Image (cartoon, grey):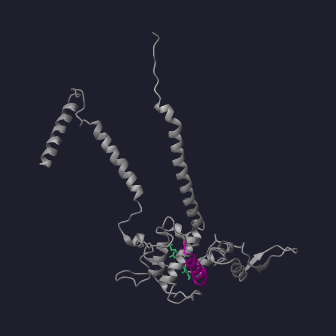
């Protein structure tokens, strides 16, 4: 029944449409199809919509192997709007970064001092920095010299330059990890999935010599081999160092490295919300209070008799 109504309405509108448009045709008019303004509007809207849609979803590929498998979302302790980082996890993650990842990956934007009161005490940070040598100078003689690190120094680099890094990794460049959770779709979920996602290549998939199969990496073949195996580090707090535990800790550490202001930002946000909400309520009350006599008054004009 609804479809009958719909089709009647459609017929009527077609008739109406024909009436409207045939009126304006004369003998000299070219026998082209008359266009209703509504049609122009609809066509324009769909072209604009389709273009906007294409731009928005341009990175959605039909082929998962090209884009990499979408990483599953994990309930990170810091993902809620009022949650802070798990700092014990940042400390363990730093240990994984230092003992495993730092062999190939730099962490350019983090200085030793950034770890103070986040994962380590000031004395611990000073001691850790001193274990690394930094070039400084020139001295009185104009010579450069080596000195032990200070908290103000940045994390030591893995390779002297990009060429050295590529030469040591079969042509692939291990990216700097300071902002990696911001630079990859999926953030820490992606890093976790990548580190734990090494599996044998499925039948029919050829992986070139020197590359490793990992479904989460776009293209499926990554130059970084699996680096985390149960027990490669020994945690000082006694946490069992399983592959997934280390991947979780190092992902948390890298999420912190990309967003060291995270905890303060959420605290500030909460304070701002509380203060601004109370000020809004107060100002609404004050406005109504001040305007009450004006809004409720009645002006009466009594003409002179
Ligand atoms: C033996 C050297 C080596 C070690 C150790 C290593 N990586 Fe890598 N990593 C690489 C190389 C090389 C690449 C570049 C891979 C490519 O482009 O195919 C890479 C790439 C990455 C990427 C980027 C993937 C992408 O989407 O572009 C991440 C994230 C990463 N490594 C994390 C880690 C973490 C975390 C650790 C420590 C647990 C680690 N890596 C240890 C060599 C290493």
Instruction: Tell me if I can see residue 220 in this picture.
Output: yes
Residues in magenta? Answer: 85-103
Q: On the rendered structure, is 225 left or right of 134? A: left
Quadrant in which the C terminus appears: top left
Foreground residue, 238 or 105? Answer: 238
Q: Position of residue 89 (x, y in %)?
A: 55, 78
Q: What's the magenta bit mostly, secondary-structure-wise? A: helix
Q: Nearer the viewer, residue 75 or 157?
A: 75
Location of residue 200 (image quadrant): bottom left
Q: Position of residue 156 (x, y in %)?
A: 67, 77
Residue 35 x, y percent position in the rendering: 27, 37
Instruction: Give the quarter of the image for residue 99.
Output: bottom right
Residue at 42%, 55% (x, y): give it. 55
Answer above or below: position of 299 versus 14.
above
Quarter of the image where one finds residue 147: bottom right
Which residue is at a point 32% across and 41% down the rendered structure image?
Answer: 41
State whether residue 63 is above or below residue 195: above
């Amino acid at each position: 029944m609804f479809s009958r109504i719909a089709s009647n309405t459609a017929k009527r509108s077609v008739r109406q449409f024909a009436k409207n448009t045939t009126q304006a045709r004369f003998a000299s008019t070219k026998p082209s199809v008359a266009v209703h303004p509504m049609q122009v509007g609809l066509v324009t809207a769909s072209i604009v919509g389709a273009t906007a849609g294409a731009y928005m979803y341009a990175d959605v590929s039909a082929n998962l192997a090209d884009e990499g498998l979408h990483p599953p979302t994990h309930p990170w302790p810091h993902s809620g709007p009022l949650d802070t980082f798990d700092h014990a996890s940042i400390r363990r993650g730093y240990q994984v970064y230092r003992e495993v990842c730092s062999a190939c990956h730099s962490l350019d934007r983090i200085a030793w001092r950034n770890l103070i009161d986040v994962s380590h005490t000031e004395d611990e940070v000073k001691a850790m920095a001193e274990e690394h040598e930094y070039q400084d100078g020139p001295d009185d003689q104009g010579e450069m010299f080596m000195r032990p690190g200070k908290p103000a120094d940045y994390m030591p680099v893995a390779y002297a330059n990009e060429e050295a890094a590529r030469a040591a990794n079969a042509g692939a460049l291990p990216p700097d990890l300071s902002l990696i959770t911001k630079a990859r779709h999926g953030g820490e979920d992606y890093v976790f999935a990548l580190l734990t996602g090494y599996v044998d290549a499925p039948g029919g998939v050829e992986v070139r010599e020197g590359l490793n199969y990992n479904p989460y990496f776009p293209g499926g073949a990554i130059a970084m081999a699996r680096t985390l195996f149960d027990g490669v580090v020994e945690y000082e707090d006694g946490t069992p160092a399983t592959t997934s535990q280390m991947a979780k800790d190092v992902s948390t550490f890298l999420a912190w490295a990309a967003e060291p202001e995270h905890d303060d930002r959420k605290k500030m946000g909460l304070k701002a919300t509380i203060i601004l909400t109370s000020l809004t309520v107060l100002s609404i009350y004050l406005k109504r209070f001040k305007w009450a006599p004006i809004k409720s008054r009645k002006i009466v004009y009594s003409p002179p008799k």
